[in-house]
Amino acid sequence: MHTPVMAAEAIEALALQPEGVYADVTVGLAGHTRLIAERLTTGLVIACDRDPESIELARRQTGAWGDRIRFVETRFSGLREALGGLGIKKVDGLLADLGVSRYQLTDAERGFSFSADGPLDMRMSRSQPVSAAEVVNFTAEKALADILYLYGQERRGRQIARAIVRSRPIRSTGHLARVVESVVRRTGRLHPATQTFMALRLAVNEEQEELDALLEQAPGLVRGGGRLVVISFMSLEDGKVKRAFQALARGGRARILTKHVVKPSLEEVNANPASRSAKLRVLEMV
């Protein structure tokens, strides 16, 4: 069974009511969705994801609670329309776990990781027109360096972009990782290609733009007294969430319930190292 990150903290933050309607807008393998559904009686979870393959896996994981879950394929930017299509204008709580699905990371064919060689894909939905292969092999050198710096905070973006251009065509995740290793020395425990892969994933999936859309739409989709809970894994994302929450609080639309960002316990980090960079923030609409 999939174990979601900061599960106890997220469920507590949502302040679930058994008859409430909740949205898990990053269903992944349904770890959080299942925990919400277990606590409902007449309530409902709207389980959203942009990846139809993840939705199918999540549906199988949650068969016992199927009457309490509605699965919807949508990006963050289509959330308002997706809920409207179900006749739902407001929910009692909304959860977004911005981490990449474990299924996507561990399936070499999805091309998110360099741990096993696979196609340069990185699309969260394989129906998207542009894959990492197109970005890596056809983006101009300066624009590629900008992507690596802006999205991956990779200070050696120019050197990496130059090496990529010289090595084209780059055919696989392993090939790309080796190209990065040729110009970036390993320091510490992180693989030299970690930030490059993260930057390309963000660019391919327009993740920053989609997060902006979520932070613009979500407050209007949560009823007064309802909670907006966001788990982020990168400082770039957490900064956006923090600033958006602060703006809503200053405008009198919400109260920030996490004066200090909540981080996973030492026990969770030891049991699940992937959780170590997680940060949870909670907003209550008024």
Image (cartoon, rainbow, N blue to C red):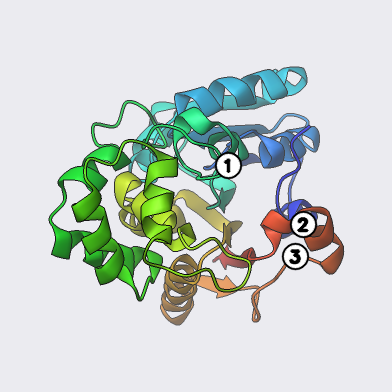
Q: CA distance from mark 1 to mark 2?
A: 14 Å
Q: Earlier in the sequence, mark 1 or mark 3?
A: 1
Q: CA distance from mark 2 to mark 3?
A: 14 Å
Is 104 situated left or right of 21 in this image? left
Q: Kindly state the secondary structure of the residue where label 2 is placed.
A: helix
Residue at label 3? Answer: 264
* Structural crowding at the residue carrying mark 2, measured as other residues with C-alpha within 10 Å and reported as few (<14), some (14–19) or many (≥20): few
How far across and how far down the image is residue 179, in percent?
36, 54
Q: CA distance from mark 1 to mark 3?
A: 20 Å
Residue at label 2? Answer: 12
Q: Is residue 153 at all visible to an observer of this figure?
A: yes
How far across and how far down the image is residue 97, in percent?
58, 51
Toward the front, the furthest residue is 182
The image shows residue 44, relative to residue 149, as above or below, that is: above
* Structural crowding at the residue carrying mark 3, measured as other residues with C-alpha within 10 Å and reported as few (<14), some (14–19) or many (≥20): many
Please identify, in this view, whether the residue under mark 1 or under mark 3 is nearer the observer: 3
How far across and how far down the image is residue 211, in percent?
39, 56
Is 18 situated left or right of 96 in this image? right
Residue at label 1? Answer: 24
Q: Amino acid at mark 1?
A: Asp
Q: Kindly state the secondary structure of the residue where label 1 is placed.
A: strand
Q: Amino acid at mark 3?
A: Pro
